């Protein structure tokens, strides 16, 4: 597979299932729970300094804050995932082969640079960024007041 540029298809809803399996294996769950706890503590400490309030006096996140939360979560997940990739190597290879529509053998045979570039390209896909923006604007984060 040397010198072959792999093209990734657009991510679909079905890609969510192997992604969640990978995130579980690379120990992202604990990091997300810590992130939620940290956000709750920060929100609680800054309750008096709220800039935007709804009729109940609780914080509503602005679009910029939602974007910042989503990007911070994405960066933390990316870092945690990269540090623990070996724990989900086969699942990652299967997901990459699916997204690139090639045999998993072709993914396994990639050189280090090509494989690294492919992983980084996957994490920079717009659909993945949108997924984390969606998480940031979900009720879980809205309840952190």
Image (cartoon, helix red, strand yellow):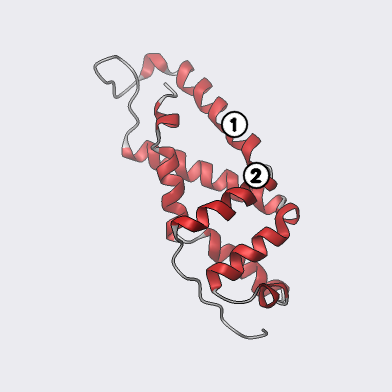
Above or below: residue 4 compared with residue 88: below
Picture quadrant where residue 31 is located = top right
Please state if 61 lies on the left or on the right of 39 as rendered: left
Please state if 7 lies on the left or on the right of 113 as rendered: left
- Quadrant that contains the N terminus: bottom right
* Residue corresponding to mark 1: 33
Above or below: residue 105 compared with residue 139: below
CA–CA distance in space, label 1 to label 2:
12 Å
| Residue at (46, 46) in percent of width and height | 132
| Dot 1 or dot 2, earlier in sequence | 2
In percent of width and height, residue 25 lies at: 69, 47
Picture quadrant where residue 3 is located = bottom right
Above or below: residue 10 compared with residue 28: below
Q: Which mark is residue 83?
A: none
| Residue at (46, 62) in percent of width and height | 11
Density class for disc 1 (Cα within 10 Å; few <14, some 14-19, many ≥20) is: few
- Helix or strand or loop: what does disc 1 sit on? helix
Residue farthest toward the right in the current orientation of the protein = 86
* Residue corresponding to mark 2: 24
Nearest-to-viewer mark from 1 and 2? 2
- Helix or strand or loop: what does disc 2 sit on? helix
- Quadrant that contains the C terminus: top left
In percent of width and height, residue 104 lies at: 66, 72
| Residue at (54, 66) in percent of width and height | 121
């Amino acid at each position: 597979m040397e010198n072959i540029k792999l093209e990734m298809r657009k991510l679909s809803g079905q890609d969510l299932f192997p992604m969640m399996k990978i995130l579980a294996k690379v120990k992202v769950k604990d990091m997300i729970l810590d992130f939620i706890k940290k956000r709750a503590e920060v929100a609680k400490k800054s309750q008096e300094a709220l800039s935007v309030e709804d009729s109940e006096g609780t914080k509503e996140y602005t679009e910029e804050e939602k974007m910042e939360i989503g990007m911070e979560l994405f960066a933390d997940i990316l870092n945690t995932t990269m540090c623990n990739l070996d724990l989900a190597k086969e699942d990652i290879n299967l997901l990459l082969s699916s997204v690139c529509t090639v045999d998993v053998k072709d993914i396994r045979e990639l050189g280090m640079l090509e494989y690294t570039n492919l992983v980084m390209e996957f994490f920079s896909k717009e659909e993945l960024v949108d997924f984390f923006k969606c998480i940031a604007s979900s009720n879980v984060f809205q309840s952190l007041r």
